[in-house]
Image: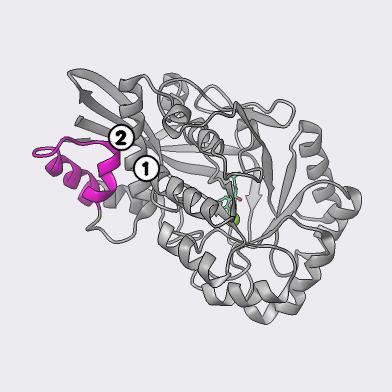
């Protein structure tokens, strides 16, 4: 393929309710969408990509404005240079961008747009590309920190009424044992897990072990991104299975985590690990070690939600993901919305990896567009 130009669109989408984690409260999602124009075998194709980075560097070091900078200064010029001499494919994008250290969410979005264009030109769905045979995936929901326990119980009831099959509660010091106990007492049999987004240290081990009595599926990333060894230590001090999110930024880190006993379960987020192809490698690695994986989310629009749903159809994704319906975050998605049916989301089978946004809704949500020509 030959890229002719790319439009980098910054969108601002209001959330249906504020989303609070141990690191921030979000009321809007400022998200970068890539519209990549290319020629493939003489045919003009558009590929769509979505970047997982948040507007501030509070989940990882990446943030929207920084992503735009690294894409325009380095990533696209490097791809444009590479395509002068080598045919560009999605499978070679990571190689062409290898010289740039880190910036995985930026690279993931670029690879995503290229792969989407490639699959569209071939008339292949992402599910078929991955060899996914399942038709749908179970839908879990990530529930932010609430103002009070009664409020939390209300929110939980709403999601259960909507059909979600698994709940994930965000926790932080001061919002952990009591809210988890309240939800567990109200819903003794509901699959339940917690996510601390790195808010604790190993000093809190005895406190965190008190979560063991609530029969949780897992505890996600209690300690810092760099605390791989400490997670391994904590895993020996509590019965709840240890799951890593932030710490696993590559297949190499996944292998380290597995070897060290730092993760019994891995949250795979394609954006965090540099793209869907690396995500697939982590899936394959984990599966060969008997380590369960599930698909995490970054409040994706329908563009990224489509790709996540297909990825989560792979056989090692044995736990429900944070792949909720569009209306979990957005009153109006920019694509045809994803809906939950009997607790499941259908895996898209149209050509391409992303779901194509509606032109009018995309335009209405766009606050800034930057065009980069090859
Ligand atoms: O830790 O999984 C996380 C959202 C933003 C940043 C980090 C996380 C999350 C979520 C939401 O938990 C997952 C979703 O998109 O539904
Ligand atoms: Mg997480």
Q: Which residue is drawn at 55% across and 28% down?
A: 133
Asked whether residue 52 appears in the rendered view, the answer is: no
User: Which residue is labeled 2 in the image?
Assistant: 114
* Mark carried by residue 22: none
Q: Residue at x 24, y 48 (%)?
A: 75
Secondary element at tag 2: helix
Q: Where is residue 126 in the image (x, y as percent from the top left)?
A: 44, 30
Instruction: Please indicate whether residue 258 sits to the left or right of residue 278 in the image.
Output: right
Instruction: Please indicate whether residue 105 sits to the left or right of residue 206 in the image.
Output: left
Q: Residue at x 79, y 44 (%)?
A: 156
Q: Is residue 348 magenta?
A: no
Q: Residue at x 47, y 63 (%)?
A: 255
3D distance between C-alphas at marks 2 and 1: 9 Å
Q: The magenta stretch spans which residues?
A: 72-97
Q: Where is residue 268 in the image (x, y as percent from the top left)?
A: 52, 50
Q: Does the residue labelled 2 lie within 8 Å of ligand 1?
A: no
Q: In which quarter of the image is the N terminus?
A: top left
Asked whether residue 16 appears in the rendered view, the answer is: yes
Label 1 Cα neighbours within 10 Å, binned few <14 / some 14-19 / many ≥20: many
User: Which residue is labeled 1 in the image?
Assistant: 109
Sequence-first tag of 2 and 1:
1
Q: Is residue 80 magenta?
A: yes
Judged by its main secondary structure, the magenta piece is: helix
């Amino acid at each position: 393929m030959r890229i002719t130009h790319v439009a980098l669109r910054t969108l601002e989408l209001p959330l249906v309710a504020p989303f609070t984690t141990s690191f921030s409260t979000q009321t809007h999602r400022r998200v970068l969408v890539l519209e990549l124009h290319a020629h493939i075998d003489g045919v003009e194709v558009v590929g769509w990509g979505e970047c997982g980075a948040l507007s501030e560097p509070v989940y990882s070091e990446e943030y929207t404005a920084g992503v735009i900078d690294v894409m325009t200064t380095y990533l696209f010029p490097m791809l444009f240079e590479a395509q002068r001499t080598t045919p560009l494919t999605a499978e070679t994008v990571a190689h062409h961008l290898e010289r740039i250290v880190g910036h995985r969410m930026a690279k993931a979005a670029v690879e995503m747009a290229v792969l989407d264009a490639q699959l569209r030109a071939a008339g292949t769905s992402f599910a078929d590309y991955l060899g996914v045979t399942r038709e749908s995936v179970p839908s879990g929901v990530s529930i932010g920190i609430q103002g009070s326990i009664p409020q939390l119980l209300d929110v939980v009831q709403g999601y259960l009424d909507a059909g979600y099959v698994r709940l994930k509660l965000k926790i932080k010091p001061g919002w952990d044992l009591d809210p988890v106990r309240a939800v567990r007492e109200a819903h003794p049999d509901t699959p339940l897990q917690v996510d601390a987004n790195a808010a604790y240290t190993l000093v809190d081990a005895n406190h965190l072990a008190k979560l063991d009595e609530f029969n949780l599926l897992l505890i996600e990333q209690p300690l810092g991104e760099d605390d791989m060894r400490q997670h391994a230590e904590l895993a020996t001090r509590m019965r709840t299975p240890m799951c890593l999110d932030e710490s696993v930024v590559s297949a190499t880190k996944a292998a380290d985590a597995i070897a060290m006993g730092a993760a019994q379960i891995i949250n795979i987020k394609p954006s965090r690990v540099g793209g869907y192809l690396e995500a697939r490698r982590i899936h394959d690695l984990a599966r060969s070690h008997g380590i369960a994986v599930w698909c995490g989310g970054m409040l994706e629009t329908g563009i990224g939600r489509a790709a996540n749903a297909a990825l989560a159809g792979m056989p090692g994704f044995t736990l429900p993901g944070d792949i909720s319906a569009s209306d979990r975050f957005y009153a109006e998605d920019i694509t045809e919305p994803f809906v939950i049916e009997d607790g499941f989301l259908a895996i898209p089978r149209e050509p391409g990896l992303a779901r194509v946004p509606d032109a009018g809704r995309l335009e209405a949500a766009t606050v800034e567009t930057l065009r980069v020509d090859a």
